[in-house]
């Protein structure tokens, strides 16, 4: 049991550690992840041994007398993650084994599950002792735990014969066949792997969609076409991690234990002049102790410091827009360099947690219906002009030259207006692909209200307004997590704003968008997109920690509120008032 | 709902697509006709005279037939000058002819709207301290909520704070976000920083009153559970600030043994602060400065002791600036104030601080002998003319004397229970006179 609980803990950590609050959690377990956990976290000698050890631990704890017996894992009397997460991971591992062209049928899935659990393959169907209701109950509890811990759940049932197995299938991003296909694609051209190792997730997705869509598996194509940008982004991250692993394997480089750092761009404005300034914006996995590290750019060494979520405080790297940067990292055992690609264009959105602040960054891709800043070289202008002329894209005013950086411009307050891009011949394909929305895209933004102390939370009495944008017709429904009854159902056509009622009770909620041709009230309508949000009771607030460096400084002393201390701090005279 | 397609033989693609799209949009019919598809050229061959097929997608209600084009749709298309084929088609039937050609009519429903996020309201540095002088008693429970919220967040940006103040409706009544922030700083709940407009909640402290040393009050971070202090500790009290302009004052006997463990006792912080404070000239010399501000592209105004007047006496030179010392502000596009600064012509420095403090500093430079404060010896209250309000750090010492914000009284700010020792010490640092109430008319 101890071994199983260790695996349970490590698997939950692996799938949640790098997920920001409010973002979706996928119990995306595959053999590579099991190997990585075994070798790096549980000190196994090699990866293959780890897969066997994991399955042995599951069998030992979840099977009794050749039957599934989860009774010891279902008595959840602690606040930690469900003890059966490791067993659910085994279901996902069975879904990971499914071939791409395989008929999606319960028998195919259960054949693989039986094999993983060591059941007789002479029999078919569900492993003995493993009932449908029990399976669904565990996934529902898992989802509730995900929401209660401030993430968005992603495990949903299917319809008809795939109702139960879809829970596990919905968790797999890269299945075995997908990984093999991607490995073949990225190794098919000389130097592609080395080049692609420096791409960000959206570059991977756009490149795959443009160049390789016919050679991809059905699962990959389905996610690329998904209306859910969260799922696309999760796929992009998984592909980027896979490419880094492939490159590490082929070059003998040591792959990162904790995952890959990512780079982006941060745009702040001078408070007095309003002139924009561009900074390197780096993101490191949660397990990396970034405070020990520093990025070196030329003769300058920038200490790393967590800023928001996984992002670190933006760094003023010279010539950021115009040169490729591969910057050495000192002090971190796990990572020794980070690449910042020299892109021809960037799309920047406001801080989702602080939209009134004038700063923009690559926090995420713009949601459908959301305004953004497009920063690009002059060569973007012709393509953008065509899109504007066709009524597909709009922006405010004229492109604004970036001060001090030749041939770079900002198109401010850009917004995609239509999905009808099929008749346009792209003249700048990379830009075109990045701007082009999925025909099935669904944009969800939360505006206003009084945000709580963590992302996707609001204070009781001050809930947000939901701004949804869809191409086509969809239903939006809102329900409390752990219940099936919809509190609110709205038809979405085009852009839609819904102010949540101020009397909405404190609790965890799910906002789900389902297809317009489905009945949103009927249980079983599969959501195309899900966002969780939380209404917090005032009584739950507890004082947190302030910023110890934010003090008022006087001659020989400093003061924080009413706490006065002797100080020889002379530097920040600006604080002395 | 079932989707079928009406086949429209026509000549010319773009003009006919535009025609359909514009009518669908103007007549709000996109729910009925969500898409248009069109025939793709097949190996360069088309029917005679350049004819192609457009396929208008129709979402049929359950009671409508799926075989023939409904009369209302035929009428709509006839009105636009189109001829239609009688039979409806399903997606599979036109799939090969129209691959990747779908155009949404609904997409054109998206409105373009500039974000139009207004510039953030003035900060402490940009706005003079104002206050509720109407005598309206505000609902201070919202200030309590704001303090709980700030405490839970820990620290953040000015824009986050503004959003919270506005969401709680605190601005609607009388005070700007800067005014709310000033009161929180005065009460020792929050620290703010001028150069990057950030705030942080202050440590939780119990402060002893200057004149009533058997009474302490709470400062710093606070949560809803602190309300229990009032019910759990004998002699504790919860009182509304003057005009309800801040979080409630929670006071308790200084010698109580049942205070929360995380409260740091800091004694008579106001007196300690007064003894550490610099003189006003030292304070000015320690202010941060705006380095070589560009005076072009905007308007410079000088504060004459009462109002702001356009100024052309200060000019940029090769080595610095030429012009008289004084308090200036610089207005940019749309007459928006970009900065205030106290200009020191001798040192060629443009000093920054809270605007109230800068005005006081300007007064000490120009009308030093007119500055005075009044002490009521019977109560220990201190009265300061509203127009001579002190810089924030000096005023904080006055408020921390008792835990009470000042109350307005006939053009004066009345600081409760300050006492002679503290009043004279601070006035001495500021170089101004203290008169007793009996001497004052």
Image: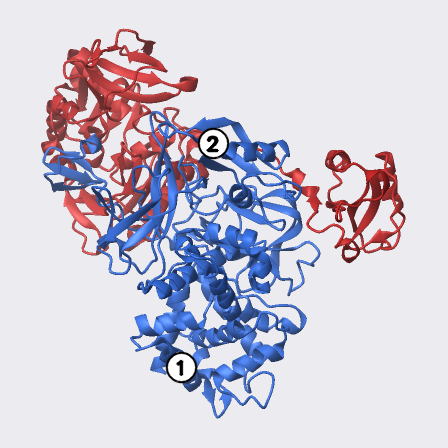
Which quadrant is home to the N terminus of chain A? bottom left
Residue carrying label 2: A378
The label shown at residue A52 is: 1
Q: What chain is colored blue?
A: A
- Residue drawn at x 71%, y 41% is B105
Quadrant into which the C terminus of chain A falls: top left
Query: Residue A505: horizontal and vertical position, in percent?
Result: 51, 54
User: Can you say whether A430 is above or below A400 in the image?
Assistant: below
Check the image and report above or below for A527 versus B10. below
Q: Chain of mark 2?
A: A
In the displayed structure, A410 sits above or below A283; it is: above
Please tell me if label 2 and label 1 are on a single chain. yes
Give me the C-alpha separation between circle 2 and circle 1: 55 Å
Residue at the image point whose x is 51% and y is 84% from the top: A115
| Left or right, residue B270 beside residue B124 | left
Image hue for chain B:
red
Furthest toward the bottom, the residue is: A65
């Amino acid at each position: 049991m101890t071994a199983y609980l260790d695996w349970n803990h490590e698997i939950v950590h692996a799938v949640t550690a790098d997920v920001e609050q409010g973002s979706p959690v996928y119990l995306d377990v595959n053999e590579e992840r099991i190997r990585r956990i075994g070798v790096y976290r549980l000190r196994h000698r090699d990866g293959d041994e780890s897969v066997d050890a994991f399955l042995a631990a599951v069998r030992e704890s979840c099977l009794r007398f050749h039957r599934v017996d989860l009774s010891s894992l279902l008595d959840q009397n602690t606040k930690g993650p469900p003890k059966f997460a490791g067993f659910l991971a085994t279901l996902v591992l069975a879904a990971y084994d499914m071939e791409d062209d395989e008929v999606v049928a319960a028998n195919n899935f259960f054949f693989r599950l039986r094999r993983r659990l060591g059941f007789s393959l002479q029999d078919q169907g569900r492993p003995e002792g493993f009932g449908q209701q029990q399976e669904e109950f565990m996934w529902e509890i898992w989802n509730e735990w995900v929401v209660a811990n401030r993430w968005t759940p992603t495990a949903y049932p299917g319809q008809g014969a795939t109702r139960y197995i879809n829970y596990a299938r919905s968790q797999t991003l890269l299945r075995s066949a997908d990984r093999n296909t991607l490995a073949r694609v990225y190794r098919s051209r000389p130097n592609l792997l080395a080049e692609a190792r420096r791409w960000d997730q959206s570059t991977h997705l756009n490149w795959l969609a443009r160049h390789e869509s016919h050679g991809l598996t059905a699962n990959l194509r389905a996610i690329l076409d998904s209306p859910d940008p969260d799922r696309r982004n999760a796929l992009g991250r998984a592909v980027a991690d896979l490419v880094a692993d492939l490159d590490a394997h082929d070059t003998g480089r040591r792959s990162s234990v904790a995952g890959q750092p990512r780079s982006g761009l941060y745009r702040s404005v001078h408070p007095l002049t309003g002139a924009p300034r561009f900074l390197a914006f780096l993101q490191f996995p949660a397990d990396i102790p970034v405070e020990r590290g520093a990025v070196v750019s030329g003769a300058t060494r920038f200490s790393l410091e967590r800023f928001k979520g996984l992002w670190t405080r933006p760094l003023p790297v010279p010539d950021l827009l115009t040169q490729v940067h591969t910057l050495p990292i000192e002090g971190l055992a796990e990572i020794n360099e980070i690449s910042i690609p020299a892109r021809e264009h960037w799309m920047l959105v406001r801080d989702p947690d602080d939209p009134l602040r004038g700063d923009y960054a690559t926090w995420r891709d713009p949601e459908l219906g959301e305004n953004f800043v497009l920063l690009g070289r002059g060569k973007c202008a012709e393509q953008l002009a065509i899109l504007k002329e066709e009524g597909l894209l709009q922006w405010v005013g004229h492109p604004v030259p970036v001060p001090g950086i030749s041939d770079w411009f900002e198109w401010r307050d850009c917004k995609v207006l239509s999905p009808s891009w099929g008749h346009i011949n792209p003249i700048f394909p990379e830009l075109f692909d990045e701007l082009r929305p999925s025909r099935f895209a669904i944009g969800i933004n939360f505006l206003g209200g009084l945000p709580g102390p963590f992302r996707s939370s609001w204070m009781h009495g001050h809930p947000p307004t939901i701004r949804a944008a869809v191409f086509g017709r969809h239903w939006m429904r809102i329900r409390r997590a752990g219940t099936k009854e919809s509190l609110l159902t709205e038809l979405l056509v085009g852009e839609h704003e819904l102010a949540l009622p101020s009397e909405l009770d404190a609790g965890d909620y799910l906002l789900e968008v389902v297809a317009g041709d489905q009945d949103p009230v009927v249980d079983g309508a599969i959501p195309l997109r899900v966002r969780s949000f939380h209404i917090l009771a005032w009584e739950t607030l507890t004082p947190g920690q302030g910023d110890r460096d934010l003090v008022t400084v006087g001659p020989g002393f400093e003061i924080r509120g009413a706490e006065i201390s002797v100080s020889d701090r002379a530097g920040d005279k600006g604080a002395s008032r | 709902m079932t989707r079928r397609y009406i086949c429209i033989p026509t000549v010319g693609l773009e003009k006919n697509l535009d025609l359909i799209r514009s009518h669908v949009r103007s007549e709000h019919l996109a729910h009925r006709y969500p898409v248009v598809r069109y025939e793709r050229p097949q190996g360069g061959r088309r029917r005679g005279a350049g004819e192609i097929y457009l396929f208008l997608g129709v979402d049929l209600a359950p009671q409508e037939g799926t075989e023939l084009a409904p009369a209302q749709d035929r009428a709509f298309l006839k009105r636009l000058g189109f001829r239609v084929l009688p039979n409806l088609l399903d997606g599979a039937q036109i799939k090969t002819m129209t691959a990747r050609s779908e155009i949404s009519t609904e997409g054109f429903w998206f409105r373009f709207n500039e974000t139009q996020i207004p510039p953030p309201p003035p900060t402490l540095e940009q706005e003079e301290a104002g206050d509720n002088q109407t005598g309206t008693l505000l609902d201070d429970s919202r200030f309590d909520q704001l303090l709980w919220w700030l405490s839970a967040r820990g620290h953040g940006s000015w824009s986050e704070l503004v959003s919270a103040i506005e969401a709680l409706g605190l601005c609607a009544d009388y005070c700007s976000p800067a005014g709310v922030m000033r009161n929180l700083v005065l009460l020792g709940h929050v620290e703010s920083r001028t150069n990057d407009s950030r705030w942080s909640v202050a440590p939780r402290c119990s402060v002893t009153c200057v004149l009533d040393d058997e009474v302490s009050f709470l400062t710093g971070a606070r949560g809803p559970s602190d309300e229990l202090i009032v019910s759990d500790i004998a002699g504790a009290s919860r009182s509304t600030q003057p005009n309800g302009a801040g979080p409630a004052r929670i006071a308790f006997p200084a010698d109580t043994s049942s205070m929360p463990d995380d409260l740091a006792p800091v004694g008579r912080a106001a007196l300690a602060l007064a003894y550490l404070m610099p003189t006003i000239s030292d304070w000015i010399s320690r202010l941060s400065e705006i380095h070589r501000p560009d005076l072009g592209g905007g308007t410079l105004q000088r504060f004459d002791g009462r109002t702001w007047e356009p100024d052309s006496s200060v000019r940029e030179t090769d080595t610095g600036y030429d012009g008289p010392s004084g308090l200036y502000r610089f207005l940019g596009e749309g007459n928006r104030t970009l900065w205030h600064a106290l200009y020191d012509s001798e040192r060629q420095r443009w000093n920054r601080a809270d605007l109230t403090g800068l005005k006081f500093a300007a007064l000490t430079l120009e009308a030093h002998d007119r500055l005075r404060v009044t002490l009521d010896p019977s109560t220990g209250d201190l009265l300061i003319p509203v127009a001579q309000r002190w810089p924030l750090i000096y005023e904080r010492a006055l408020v921390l004397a008792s835990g009470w914000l000042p109350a307005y009284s006939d053009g004066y700010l009345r600081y409760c229970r300050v006492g002679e020792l503290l009043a004279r010490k601070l006035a001495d640092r500021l170089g101004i006179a203290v008169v007793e109430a009996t001497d004052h008319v």
